[in-house]
Amino acid sequence: MDFSSDTSAPAHPQILEALDRVNSGTEPSYGADSETLKLKAALAERFETDVEVLPVASGTAANALALSIVCGSMESVICHREAHIERDERGAPEFFTGGGKLHLCGGDHAKLDLDEVKSVCAGIQRGFVHETPPAALSLTNLTESGARYSADETAALAQIARNADLKVHLDGARFANALVSGEETPATMSWQAGVDLMSFGFTKNGALGCELIVLFNDMIERFPQLQARAKRAGHLPPKMRYLSAQALAMLEGDLWLSSARIANTKAQAVAEILTSEAGARLAHPVEGNEVFAHMPDKVFESLLSKGLRAYKWIDGSVRFVCHWNTSQKDVDDLAAACRQLT
């Protein structure tokens, strides 16, 4: 019963097939290869606009490098206090920006509170020597509590940011899970809602290790700067075709969406089991592939003794994460273990 993380999952077989396919002959280095060129075209088609793209190996690298081209060393990034860039990246955004800081805001289910962001932006004093003025806003979809921003919610936050002359970054480590939970498109959930650049994740959705930094609109002009920063930081892969091949395999046939649907469907089943069989109470809405459930410690300890792998979360709930390869047996075993509790 492994519900520990979507990064615990194996790579999808189609990813391994893609890597084997490109593992012959020679190709130019550092993104000049044919796979990366095809990837750029594929992304332009999915997002319905011109883009620039830089594949990297980790979400932390994607977030930190992306933020480094919109936030200077004496500026800040508005984000939720539970955002991955604050909680889980060991100061990487601050390091890559050369000293920039994070301006933390609140909001239910790790979603930025609109009024709080509006208040922060209204109070910006760029000429005040004691302030570290924001240069960007970063939102996470899905959030770190598994909640989803709709296109309208993203657009409302982005408009506040734009009115304050801030760039908008989207941490999309679980963008596919957010997308398939609604009826919107990649375009309406990103640049059409006001997003300037995003970290587009595939690792949690079936890739071996592949995250993309995608630039939209006028951010495309900053692509040379992004490449230079990636090179200096050691995140410009010389054999980039292997990263791009993974992303292409996820996009072709919409594997990224079908994999996310599997994970989301399994999460809904887990939520139903926990609430109906274990008497758990959901801490956050289940709008993707994560379930956060409050339960007595003795219930959690009993489930652990029966083979459960899941983590206590910072709010006291237990986090259950599903992925493309979560087995029906794991779901059934969880149901049986919960029934034994009663």
Image (cartoon, rainbow, N blue to C red):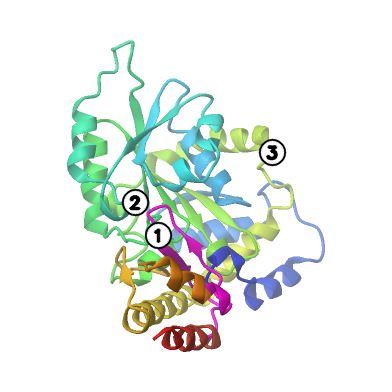
Task: Say what secondary structure mark 3 lies in.
Answer: loop
Q: Residue at x 41, y 46 (%)?
A: 83
Residue 295 in the magenta stretch? The answer is no
| Up/down of 232 relative to 275, above or below | above
Q: Which residue is mark 3?
A: 234
Of badges 3 and 1, nearer the viewer stands: 3
Q: Position of residue 156 (x, y in %)?
A: 21, 48
Q: Are the residues flagged by discs 1 and 2 in contact, CB closer than 8 Å?
A: yes
Mark sitting earlier along the chain (1/2): 1
Give residue 109's mark.
Answer: none
As drawn, which residue projects farthest toward the top? 129
In the image, residue 2 above or below residue 117: below
Q: Which residue is mark 1?
A: 47
Query: At which x and y percent is residue 117?
Result: 24, 38
Magenta span has 309?
A: yes
Question: Residue 87: percent from the left, percent from the top?
Answer: 47, 44
Q: CA distance from mark 3 to mark 2?
A: 28 Å
Asked if 248 appears above or below 52 in the picture, the reply is: below
Residue type at tag 2: Trp
**SS at badge 1:** helix
Cα distance in 3D space between marks 3 and 1: 28 Å
Kindly report the distance in space between the C-alpha atoms of the residues bearing marks 1 and 2: 8 Å
Q: Earlier in the sequence, mark 3 or mark 1?
A: 1
Span of residues in magenta? 304-327
Tell whether 235 sits left or right of 295: right
What amino acid is at disc 1? Phe
